[in-house]
C-alpha cells in the first residue's frame, strides 16, 4: 500500500504540501492514521509537479524521512499542480526509484495506492518498472485518461482482490478513483487537495465514498459512482 496526495490550485511549495503538515506524507511514511494495509511506507517516495506544461519528478527508493536533500530543496519548489506519494511495496515487488510514483507518460503524473495481480494486466512496453503499480499506470496511459473509470472497473472485475485508488493530474485537471481504500478531499477557494488521508485536522475535509471517480478542473469538482459500484 501507499499514501498519496494531489494538489490543483494556486502555486504551493512541495514542502508546504508534503513535509510541513502535521499529518502530511512525511508523517504518513512512518505513522499513517488511516492505512488499512501495512504500518510503514518506507519503500520509497516520489514528488511530481508541473513546470508549465512539463511534468517534473523527484523519486527515491529510500524512506522520505531520511532524505535531507529533498527537505532542503522542497521549500523552493512551487507549482499549482502536484502529485506525491510514499510507498509500501507490494510483497515480491522491487524496491527501486523507478517503482515509486508518480509515473508519467510525459503529459500526466499518476500514483496508484493499492495492489493488483499483474496477471490480469496486459504487457505494456512503456511500464517504468516491473512492479504492479507501474504496469497498471502504463495500462491506463495506453488506454487514455478519458477511460480511467472504465479501466478501473474492468480490472477490478478481473481481480476482485485488487485495490485501485488512482490519483492523476496533467497540470490543469486532476482525476482520482476510490476502489478499496481511503481518499479524502479538501476543497477551498485556493484549490483542491485529494489525499489518502487528511494531512491536518481541518474540519472541511470530506471522505470520498468507495468506488467513485473524482474529477477536478477549473475550480470545480465532481464525484460520480463508478460502474459496478453497487
Image: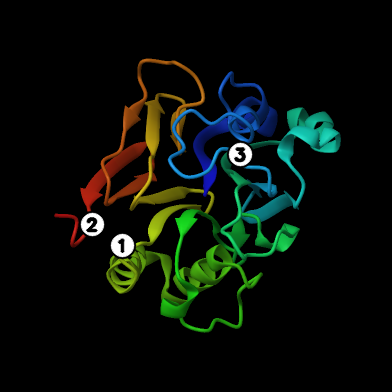
Residues at marks 3 and 1 touching, judged by CB atoms closer than 8 Å: no
Secondary structure beneath label 1: helix
Residue 217 is left or right of residue 51, and the answer is left
Identify which residue is drawn at 66% across, 70% down.
129
Camera-side residue of 150 and 52: 150
Within 10 Å of the Cα at label 3, are there few (<14), some (14-19), or many (20+) other Cα atoms?
A: many
Camera-side residue of 62 and 140: 62
- Quadrant showing the C terminus: bottom left
The residues bearing labels 1 and 2 have C-alpha atoms spaced at a distance of: 6 Å
Residue 118 is left or right of residue 155, and the answer is right
Determine whether 123 is above or below 212 in the image: below
User: Circle 3 is placed at which residue position?
Assistant: 40
First in sequence: mark 1 or mark 2?
Answer: 1
Determine whether 20 is above or below 107 in the image: above
Which numbered tag is attached to residue 226? Answer: 2
First in sequence: mark 2 or mark 3?
Answer: 3
Which numbered tag is attached to residue 149? Answer: 1
Within 10 Å of the Cα at label 2, are there few (<14), some (14-19), or many (20+) other Cα atoms?
A: many
Determine whether 23 is above or below 105 in the image: above
Camera-side residue of 204 and 79: 204
Q: Position of residue 187 (x, y in %)?
A: 38, 28
Secondary structure beneath label 3: loop
Identify which residue is drawn at 56% across, 23% down.
23
* Viewer-nearest of discs 3 and 1: 3
Q: Residue furthest left?
A: 230
Q: Position of residue 51 (x, y in %)?
A: 67, 48
Quarter location, residue 55: bottom right
Secondary structure beneath label 2: loop
Quarter location, residue 104: bottom right
Camera-side residue of 155 and 150: 155
* Viewer-nearest of discs 2 and 3: 3
Residues at marks 1 and 2 touching, judged by CB atoms closer than 8 Å: yes
Amino acid at each position: 500500500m501507499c499514501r498519496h496526495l494531489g494538489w490543483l490550485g494556486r502555486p504551493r511549495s512541495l514542502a508546504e504540501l508534503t513535509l510541513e503538515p502535521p499529518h502530511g506524507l512525511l508523517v504518513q511514511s512512518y505513522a499513517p492514521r488511516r492505512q488499512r494495509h501495512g504500518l510503514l511506507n518506507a519503500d520509497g517516495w516520489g514528488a511530481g509537479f508541473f513546470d508549465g506544461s512539463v511534468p517534473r519528478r523527484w523519486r527515491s527508493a529510500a524512506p522520505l524521512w531520511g532524505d535531507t536533500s529533498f527537505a532542503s530543496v522542497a521549500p523552493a519548489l512551487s507549482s499549482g499542480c502536484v502529485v506525491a506519494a510514499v510507498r509500501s511495496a507490494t510483497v515480491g515487488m522491487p524496491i527501486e526509484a523507478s517503482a515509486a510514483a508518480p509515473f508519467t507518460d510525459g503529459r500526466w503524473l499518476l500514483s496508484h495506492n493499492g495492489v493488483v495481480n499483474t496477471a490480469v494486466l496486459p504487457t505494456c512496453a512503456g511500464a517504468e518498472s516491473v512492479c504492479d503499480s507501474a504496469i497498471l499506470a502504463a495500462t491506463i496511459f495506453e488506454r487514455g485518461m478519458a477511460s480511467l473509470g472504465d479501466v478501473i472497473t474492468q480490472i477490478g472485475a478481473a481481480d476482485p482482490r485488487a485495490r485501485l485508488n488512482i490519483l492523476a493530474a496533467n497540470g490543469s485537471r486532476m482525476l482520482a478513483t476510490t476502489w478499496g481504500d481511503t481518499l479524502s478531499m479538501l476543497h477551498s477557494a485556493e484549490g483542491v487537495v485529494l489525499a489518502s488521508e487528511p494531512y491536518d485536522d481541518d474540519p472541511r475535509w470530506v471522505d470520498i465514498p468507495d468506488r467513485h471517480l473524482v474529477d477536478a478542473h477549473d475550480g470545480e469538482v465532481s464525484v460520480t459512482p463508478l460502474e459496478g459500484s453497487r
